[in-house]
């Protein structure tokens, strides 16, 4: 029964569409905020223009009204107001009101005198202006009210009403132009946002495609670096990560190759050059080498280079006398011996090493190196090292772990071969002892048979001599002596039989047969098989 798989989630908008919408939304919101701030200001500008015009009209009326106040003759005021209404279409009405409510009302239809209250006689003597629809005139206008004082006397008010036809036309034109500009800006911002988002997101989409290929196992995929900003740095990082994964896989492949070679070979030293070349090529290193530790004078550990692989164009160092019997007490390398003995990996740039170490590394052209300890049966046997001579290389954790696996495998192979060699030596020693003991027993048996034959011949000669000489007593005495000799021979024969029983020749032969039957898996037979475990105890007895 196949396991149920979750239904794929519905995909939303892609990153390009989302980025476009985000940029476009920001542009539209910014435009709306600009329009929202611009229109009231522009409208206020139009109102300020109306106020300025109304104020100018009221100022011009003050001089005429001042004469009327003195003479109480309002005909001049009426004529002046009529002339102003006729000469300026923008002036809709003029109302002059005394404090007692007497008012002269002028508009396009003529003039009249009325007593007005309320709006026409404000309680606060301050100039005001706003768009209104006064009941007296019955139409919408901009009504400006200016207090009229003469010689310190608060005489009344001058009200100037301006037509809003020009204001409405200007405001309508402003709305149309603003709407047109806004539409153009919205369309342009949408196109610009789309182009910008596409340009911005294209490296991300390319990176996504590369990551998918890498996830699918194509470690040869590389991202194209199109920018010099954070996205470009991200592309470089993805390429570096992919290259590190590729090197790790190659190193793991070299470890697999090493395992096959070590298992198939009878002696690891015979396949070590091929294994070392595979590891060095997989790690893209300049050199790969093996050092073996040997005891020096006073118990000091000395390291000898026994294998080396070099990339084309890189000088070999296996003939370097400084690397044969290398002491970890050498200036600049004191800390190496302690860390490697603890099983720690050492990775350094040559520029970060102490002065003495930098000199030795510079002579070999080393700019970066990685050293992994090799341990066998719990002790430090030597090291696996890699040099980089072309650049200052930082070794990744994946590379270190993979190369440590190779070093551990080599250590296990060395330990296995040591055990196998010891078992083969024990087998050869056992066979030699069996052959030696068999020869001794054969010699003893042959000696016994020879003694019996000689005794029989002697007895036959003595009997013949006795009969010929007729000396029965002599023959009897001789036979008595012969009997004593035969008794001695029997005693010797019994002793020989006891020695043969103690030697357990048959058991030795069976033991040799068992060892020969398990010659192909001798280590496993002696170490794991219950019957094989008793062999060593039997041989010790």
Image (cartoon, grey):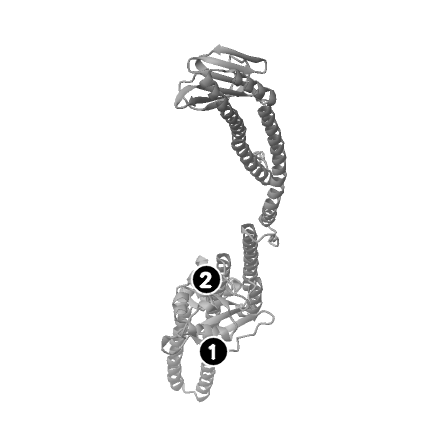
| Number of numbered callouts drawn | 2
Seen from this angle, which residue lies furthest left?
298
Q: Nearer the viewer, residue 354 or 201?
A: 201
Q: CA distance from mark 1 to mark 2?
A: 43 Å
Residue 387 coordinates in the image, percent (x, y): 52, 68
In the picture, the disc for residue 10 is none
Q: Is 117 placed above or below 24 here?
A: above
Residue 133 coordinates in the image, percent (x, y): 52, 16
Residue 391 shown left or right of residue 156 in the figure: right
Mark earlier in primary sequence (1, 2): 1
* Mark 2 neighbour class, 10 Å CA radius: few under 14, some 14 to 19, many 20 or more: some
Which quarter of the rendering shows the C terminus?
A: bottom left
Which quarter of the rendering shows the N terminus?
A: top right
Residue 54 coordinates in the image, percent (x, y): 52, 25
Q: Which residue is mark 2?
A: 526
Q: Which residue is mark 1?
A: 322
Q: Is residue 445 visible?
A: no
Seen from this angle, which residue lies furthest front?
71
């Amino acid at each position: 029964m196949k396991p149920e798989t979750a239904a794929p989630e519905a995909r939303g908008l892609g990153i390009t569409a989302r980025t476009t919408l985000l940029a476009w939304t920001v542009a539209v919101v910014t435009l709306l905020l600009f329009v929202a701030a611009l229109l009231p200001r522009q409208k206020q500008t139009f109102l300020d223009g109306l106020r300025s015009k109304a104020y100018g009209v009221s100022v011009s009326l003050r001089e005429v009204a001042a004469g009327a106040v003195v003479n109480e003759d309002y005909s001049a005021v009426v004529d002046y107001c009529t002339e102003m209404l006729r000469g300026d279409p923008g002036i809709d009405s003029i109302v002059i009101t005394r404090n007692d409510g007497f008012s002269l009302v002028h508009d396009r239809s003529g003039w009249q005198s009325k007593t007005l209250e309320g709006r026409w006689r404000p309680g606060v003597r301050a100039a005001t202006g706003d768009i209104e629809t006064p009941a007296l005139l019955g139409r919408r206008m901009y009504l400006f009210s200016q207090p009229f004082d003469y010689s310190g006397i608060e005489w009344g008010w001058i009200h100037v009403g301006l037509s809003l036809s020009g204001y409405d036309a200007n405001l309508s034109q402003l709305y149309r132009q603003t709407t047109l500009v806004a539409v153009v800006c919205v369309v342009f911002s949408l196109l610009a946002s789309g182009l910008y988002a596409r340009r911005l997101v294209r490296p991300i989409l390319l990176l996504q495609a590369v990551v998918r290929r890498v996830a699918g196992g194509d470690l040869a995929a590389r991202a194209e670096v199109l920018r010099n900003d954070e996205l470009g740095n991200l592309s470089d990082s993805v390429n570096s990560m992919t290259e590190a994964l590729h090197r790790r896989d190659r190193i793991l492949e070299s470890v697999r190759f090493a395992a096959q070679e070590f298992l198939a070979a009878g002696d690891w030293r015979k396949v070590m050059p091929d294994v070392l070349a595979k590891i060095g090529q997989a790690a893209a290193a300049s050199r790969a080498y093996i050092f073996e530790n040997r005891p020096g004078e006073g118990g000091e550990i000395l390291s000898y280079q026994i294998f080396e692989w070099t990339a084309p164009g890189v000088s070999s160092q296996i003939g370097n006398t400084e690397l044969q019997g290398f002491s970890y007490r050498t200036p600049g390398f004191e800390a190496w011996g302690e860390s490697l003995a603890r099983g720690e990996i050492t990775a350094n740039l040559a520029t970060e090493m102490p002065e003495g170490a930098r000199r030795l590394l510079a002579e070999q052209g080393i700019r970066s190196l990685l050293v992994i300890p090799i341990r066998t049966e719990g002790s430090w046997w030597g090291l696996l090292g890699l040099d980089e001579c072309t650049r200052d290389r930082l070794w990744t954790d994946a590379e270190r772990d993979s190369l440590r696996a190779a070093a551990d495998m080599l250590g296990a192979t060395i330990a296995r071969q040591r055990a196998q060699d010891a078992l083969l030596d024990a087998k050869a020693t056992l066979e030699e002892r069996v052959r030696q003991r068999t020869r001794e027993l054969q010699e003893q048996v042959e000696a016994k048979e020879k003694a019996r034959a000689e005794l029989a011949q002697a007895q036959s000669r003595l009997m013949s001599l006795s009969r010929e000489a007729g000396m029965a007593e002599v023959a009897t005495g001789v036979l008595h002596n012969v009997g004593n000799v035969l008794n001695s021979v029997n005693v010797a024969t019994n002793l020989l039989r006891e020695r043969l029983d103690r030697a357990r020749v048959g058991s030795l032969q069976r033991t040799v047969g068992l060892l020969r039957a398990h010659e192909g898996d001798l280590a496993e037979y002696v170490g794991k098989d219950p019957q094989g475990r008793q062999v060593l105890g039997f041989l010790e007895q």
